[in-house]
Image (tube, helix red, strand yellow):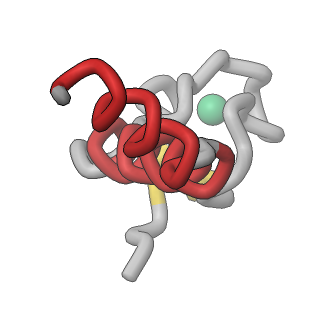
Amino acid sequence: MAKPRKCPKCSTEIGIDDDICHACGENVPFNHPWYTLPIGGLIVLGIFWLLTDFDALIEYVGLHLN
Ligand SMILES: [Zn+2]
């Protein structure tokens, strides 16, 4: 899935997890895929969902609606 990257300076192949070229020391920032942000958001939403006490929330809303 992950494609091998090459250093823009010396064209040495760089590991997908490396952000510095081992051959010339060029800083090669890791490119986050476009889906990193939505997946991160979903994880945050999932944690929020798990941590929220929905019974208490529904009871609270119900009390104020009636
Ligand atoms: Zn390099």
The answer to whether residue 11 is seen in the rendering is no
Front-most of 11 and 35?
A: 35
Give the side of residue 33 with respect to residue 43, left or right: left
Query: Which residue is at the far left?
Result: 65
Front-most of 52 and 57?
A: 57
Give the side of residue 6 with respect to residue 19, left or right: left
| Number of dots carrying numbers | 0
At x 57% / y 26%, what residue is drawn? 28
Residue 4 at what x, y percent from top left?
A: 47, 66
- Quarter holding the N terminus is bottom left
Give the side of residue 35 with respect to residue 39, left or right: left
At x 73% / y 29%, what residue is drawn? 20
On screen, residue 25 above or below 22 = above
Q: Would you identify the image quadrant in which residue 27 lies? A: top right
Residue 60 at what x, y percent from top left?
A: 44, 29
At x 54% / y 34%, what residue is drawn? 30
Front-most of 62 and 10?
A: 62
Residue 50 at what x, y percent from top left?
A: 61, 56
Quarter of the displayed picture in which ligand 1 can be seen: top right
Q: Would you identify the image quadrant in which residue 32 lies? A: top left
The answer to whether residue 65 is seen in the rendering is yes
- Quarter holding the C terminus is top left
On screen, residue 12 above or below 21 = below
At x 49% / y 24%, what residue is drawn? 9
Query: Which residue is at the far front?
Result: 66
